[in-house]
Amino acid sequence: MDKRFIDAEFCEAQAGLSQHQIQQWRTQGFTFVRGLIPQALVSALIDIASDLFPSGGSEAAEHKSGFGSSGALVFPSSYFEFNEVTLHPNLLVVICQLLELDIHEIRLTQSDLWPKYGRVATGSLRDNSDQRMHVDYPNHCLTHPPIWQQPDAVELILYLSDYQDCAGSTALVPRNDDQDPAYRWPIIDSPGIAGKDFINDRSQAERYMAGISPGLGDWRSGLYAREQYVAYRPGDILFYRHDTWHRGTPLHLGARRFVQNMTFRKASSEWIGNLHPGWAWAAYRQDQSMERWIATCTVDQRTLLGFPQPGHEYWNHDLIMAVQARYGPHGFDAGPYLEQLKQ
């Protein structure tokens, strides 16, 4: 069967998504867009990643499992460009649109940039070269996603490579409607959920699932028959959900692909956790890059991390002055918090 590729649709950067794109995410489970992040910032991030990670086909790349950035490009990073992309105003507009919330009602829970390499599969059950079809909620969420019409998180992939050079497109299964058999409830028909073994490699995972039940194996075969592939280019963004069926596909042998993964949740959805070490731990770094970031970023960007917004019940004059004492040497402006307290 020929692959069905999806091209990114342009969006007005500062205006965010069109109504068509918003509706596509809400009904089908994803939307794929271009033009949201300034190209100069995308290019700078590509240069940083290219310097940090082994080249494709190198001996060092052969020992990379494919997941994780090794810490250099996990939020908060000492690289300004990475942090700027993570909480870019254009991006935050879209998150607010998709979750239908104000900025102070949203929290960041993941941002990391990592390489995937085209290589011969290792044979490991956890090999990610050709992934099994899966949903992401089990390693983000302590519970189960709410009903489809009430999503509580947005996941996204910012692509920093070109699929024509790398292959390795993300494959997705669009949801048709409320009766779509691919999106039956509860969402447990995947390795690693409800007592099933965690197997990442596609061929081994599907043999295992068919062994549990021939009917289950047939049902999962139907997911692959419907999958569509993103024709990504540098700067394109795939917005999807914790309950969207998707998977990673193999890269060309010797290729290297960069992506940045991010997740934002409703502030009230505390059962969705940080996927990597929290922001406060970064304040232990000797370079104090986290403190400088907190001091100089926007009020909205701080709020995304859980920093109380102006007017929050946490604040009084003494606390504002105490926070000013902590971050003042790095350029913190307490003005918005003091002004709201006066009102």
Image (spheres, rainbow, N blue to C red):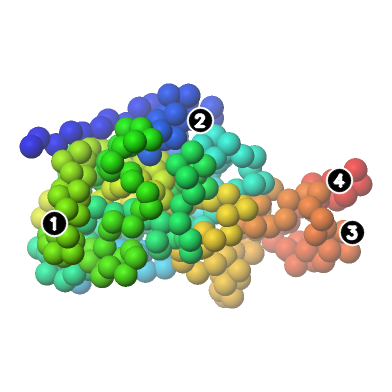
Observer-nearest of 176 and 81: 176
Asked whether the viewer can see residue 121, the reply is: yes
Amino acid type assigned to the residue bearing label 4 in the image: Glu
In contact (CB < 8 Å): disc 2 and disc 1:
no
Q: Residue at x 64, y 47 (%)?
A: 105
Q: Residue at x 35, y 32 (%)?
A: 177
Instruction: Report the residue marked by disc 4.
Output: 339
Q: Position of residue 293 (x, y in %)?
A: 61, 58
Find the distance from the CA under tag 2 to the CA under tag 1: 44 Å
Q: Residue at x 82, y 66 (%)?
A: 322
Instruction: Report the residue marked by disc 3.
Output: 317
Asked whether the viewer can see residue 82, the reply is: no
In contact (CB < 8 Å): disc 3 and disc 4:
no
Find the distance from the CA under tag 3 to the CA under tag 4: 11 Å
Nearer the observer: mark 1 or 4; the answer is 1
Q: Position of residue 185 (x, y in %)?
A: 37, 49
Q: Position of residue 27 (x, y in %)?
A: 40, 33
Nearer the observer: mark 2 or 4; the answer is 2
Assign a secondary structure to mark 3.
helix
Tell me: 91 left or right of 53.
Answer: right
Instruction: Report the residue marked by disc 2.
Output: 16
Above or below, comparing residue 284 to residue 254 in the picture: below
Query: Mark 2 or 4 closer to N-term?
Result: 2
Tell me: 198 left or right of 338.
Answer: left
Amino acid type assigned to the residue bearing label 1 in the image: Pro
Assign a secondary structure to mark 1.
helix
Q: Position of residue 211 (x, y in %)?
A: 13, 64
Amino acid type assigned to the residue bearing label 3 in the image: His
Find the distance from the CA under tag 2 to the CA under tag 4: 30 Å
Tell me: 233 left or right of 122.
Answer: right
Q: Which mark is residue 214?
A: 1
